[in-house]
Amino acid sequence: MLIIRPLQESDLDALYAMAQSAGKGLTTLPADRDLLLRKIRHSRDTFDQRCAPEAGLYLFALEDTGLEECVGISGIQARVGLDEVFYNYRLSVTVNASPELAVHVRTPTLHLSNDMTDTSEICSLLLSDSHRGGGNGLLLSRCRFMFLDHFRKHFSEKVFAEMRGVSDQDGRSPLWDALGRQFFDMDFTDADILSGLGSKSFIAELMPKFPIYLPMLPDQARAVIGRVHDNTAPALKMLQAEGFNFNGLVDIFDGGPVVEAFIHNIRTVRDSFDRTVMIRSDRAPASTSDKGTFMGASGQGARAQEMMVCNGSFKDFRITTLPADCISIDTISLSKEVARALEVEAGDRVRIAPLKDASVNTIYSGRDSNHAGKSFGA
């Protein structure tokens, strides 16, 4: 069985192995054991409500219960730019005109920006190679939207994601080589690692505050601004399907695009609904929810019309997946094993949303008319 839960210190070895295999360019999860341990402890303090809500870091593990191992991670940063300034470049146009000379020139320009300050960020999505496919990446990503919906008071109304920009196999970024390297005497990977380690003050100290006119950059650098790394293209496509759109900002290191959405407009949030738990007896006939959901150690199986199901707990948040045929007009039928995994009992309310892009109306009838943007609350 695959289940989403808060990350624990016992997941450190698995997380470190995934960070090593991810290669260069994953800023928020560098292969540094001490940093990863600090992030895990920060996340635990967040879920245990031992830190201020605006300083929260929520890290979720995808656990393969058969292997008893963390095989994926995703996260939410409650607010960015509150302890250290958060930088992006904003793409804009500078207009120069002279009526006397009949000249009107529009020049694409990059401006250093702090526009995302105090906004919630979804981040740190990483999946083990052994568990790629079968909808596992969707589950890791979309579980965050269900948590955002449940506990909106801890987050901003708008959320964003910085997408990994273009770099080659050696970790070289055309934009960094053309721009950042002119002001920082270091390689792109070194600067990216420093940023991931939290040493971001050097950006403010050394980065030019004046607009950057794109025609002054080489063609290779201009071509990658606003583009994503090939490995990140599926993640961008998924976010776009959820309602995220490019907001005109790009990463200052590699030029990757920033996409954003309002929580109430995210499709997983819009399509979610509540049901009451009904637990089947051991003698009850097994439904397809017990036969076709969790196939093999990787959990890869047919997931057509499969639904995410989550409890309403803040500290012990849990999500797993079940086929839609276990859902009725008022209830959801769970086996004892699944109920234990979700830490729910008969009569509890759970939240449900489609895992993939199927129409909710084809999966069940009688959508809760009183849901419409409501959340469980903390």
Image (tube, rainbow, N blue to C red):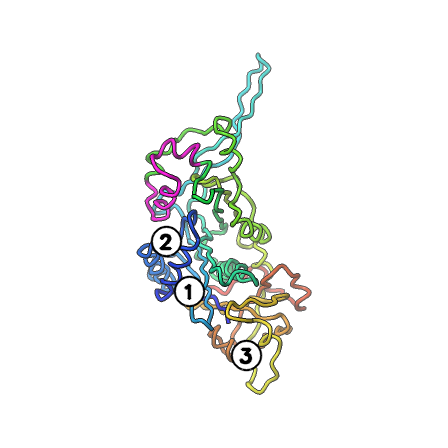
Distance from Cα at disc 3 to Cα at disc 2:
39 Å
Question: Crowdedness of circle 2 by 10 Å Cα count: few (<14), some, many (20+)?
Answer: many
Question: Crowdedness of circle 3 by 10 Å Cα count: few (<14), some, many (20+)?
Answer: some
Tag 1 secondary structure: strand
Residue 335 — which label?
Answer: 3
State the residue lying farthest toward the front.
Answer: 170
Q: Nearer the viewer, residue 163 or 147?
A: 163
The quarter in which the C terminus is drawn is bottom left
Q: Which circle's residue, 1 or 2, is located before the other in the chain?
A: 1
Please report the bounds of the magenta region as a residue range: 176-201
**Residue tagged by mark 2?**
31
Distance from Cα at disc 3 to Cα at disc 1:
23 Å
Image quadrant where residue 179 sits: top left
Q: Nearer the viewer, residue 339 or 65?
A: 65
Q: Which circle's residue, 3 or 1, is located before the other in the chain?
A: 1
Find out whether residue 204 is within the magenta segment.
no
Tag 3 secondary structure: loop
